[in-house]
Image (cartoon, grey):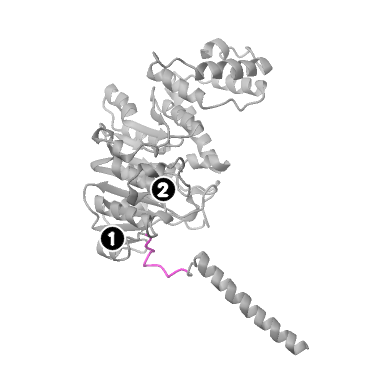
Amino acid sequence: MHWDEWAKDDEGMTGDELLKFVDQKLFPTLSNIDLSTANKRAVLVHEVFANNYNYMKSGTHLRQVINKLNEINFNDTKDKQVFGKIYETFLSELQSAGTLGEFYTPRAITDFMTEMANPQHGEKVLDIACGTGGFLTTAIDHLKKQKHSIEELEDIGKNVVGWEYKPLPYMLANTNLILHDVRTPTIRFGDSLERPLTEYTNKDRVDLILANPPFGGMVSNNNENNFPQTYRTKESADLFLILMIHLLKQGGRSAIVLPDGSLTGGGVKQRVRQKLLEDCNLHTIVRLPNSVFQPYASVATNLLFFTKGEPTKKVWYYQHKVPVGIKSYSKTKPIQLSEFDELKTWWNNRESSDVAWCEDIEKIKSNGYDLDIKNPHQPEEEKQHTSSELLDLLHASFAKGDKLLDQLRKELN
């Protein structure tokens, strides 16, 4: 199964012979590695091949891909860095490839959030829904700039941890970390919500959580029952928020992405926000334009920064706007890290402005812990009606139309 045995020779097997080997020997053999005596590296190989399939139907095309890979010297730092950048570009393209886009957070977002969270050597960093590993690799790059020894470089791979439950992004994330000099990535394959909250102990807690958890979806397998009754819901984003609060150490911090829907609403949603504000200091919310995650999602999103261990006293808001001359972000015009320069300058010297404002916790409490607070320095937008209100408006409009038709009929008669 070694690469040199079946792939290294550019004139080696190809076509149907290669396809047959990959489908009937390579994948089955590696997916059935005996784990009873296997090391961590072997376990990784097993998990990758046990949950994936070869989707290429042309052995000739597969040989062409293999030959291209053979041109890269993975023992050469420069070649590896170049290939790493190519791989990052490939992952970013997934953002516009249907549902695969859910596994990729724009690099500008992960870079900015990581820089503000500022992970340090010796800290345990976790992404509980790591997708293709964007936050993990950004944290690794951030920590590499601080390293002073080979031991510290090795510790980075042990301390930057991810969880992912879908086979394809799990495989992509492992490859991503390997290309970032982590020989054996620490990524757990499995559903982050499948374990009862009570089973986590102090040894499971971490210093920093960087994450863009799934939102807009419903949890499966009755995983909501793994949480206390007061927080049980089918909405994935709310359960992930409770889990992240629970997993942080006292003094631990977090930088996460959440949709507008998690900032407002009653019932369980309100109780989740109350816990966040009482257990953590939610010091900053960055409000993003709707188009940041297009084309696969057009919902309004926010970047939340909080520290566990003391209650929130006030929340600073900062509204990030689309650059002048651009109507909205798109595949050809994605968000850029340089756009956050003004926000970075404001971060350590906060003052109210046309894009920044502060809300006191007492006002937030009196409003049902609602965090969906619009920019007070901008003209109020046209009222957004609920579905029920829209139906009432339609009913009134139809009734008015029927009345006019009746009058016309009478006049014609």
Secondary element type, mark 2:
helix
* 217 vs 363, nearest the viewer: 217
Taking 260 as reference, is 222 above or below it?
Answer: above
Q: Which residues are magenta?
A: 372-381
Q: CA distance from mark 1 to mark 2?
A: 31 Å
Q: Quadrant of the C terminus?
A: bottom right
Mark 2 residue crowding within 10 angstroms, few (<14) / some (14–19) / many (20+): many
Query: Residue 33 at x, y = what percent?
Result: 47, 16
> Along the horizontal axis of the image, is 74 left or right of 310?
right
Secondary structure mostly seen in magenta is loop
Q: Which residue sits at x=58%, y=22%?
A: 68
Amino acid type indicated by mark 2 = Ala
Query: Residue 43 at x, y = what percent?
Result: 42, 20
Q: In the rendered structure, find residue 109 and report the number of the disc placed on it.
A: none
Query: Residue 28 at x, y = what percent?
Result: 55, 18
Amino acid type indicated by mark 1 = Glu
Residue highlighted by disc 2: 237
In the rendered image, the residue lying farthest to the right is 413
Earlier residue among tags 1 and 2: 2
Q: In the rendered structure, find residue 351 and report the number of the disc placed on it.
A: 1
Q: Which residue sits at x=55%, y=48%?
A: 295
* 245 vs 304, nearest the viewer: 245
* 73 vs 170, nearest the viewer: 170
Q: Is residue 209 magenta?
A: no
Taking 73 as reference, is 91 above or below it?
Answer: below
Q: Which residue sits at x=48%, y=34%?
A: 166
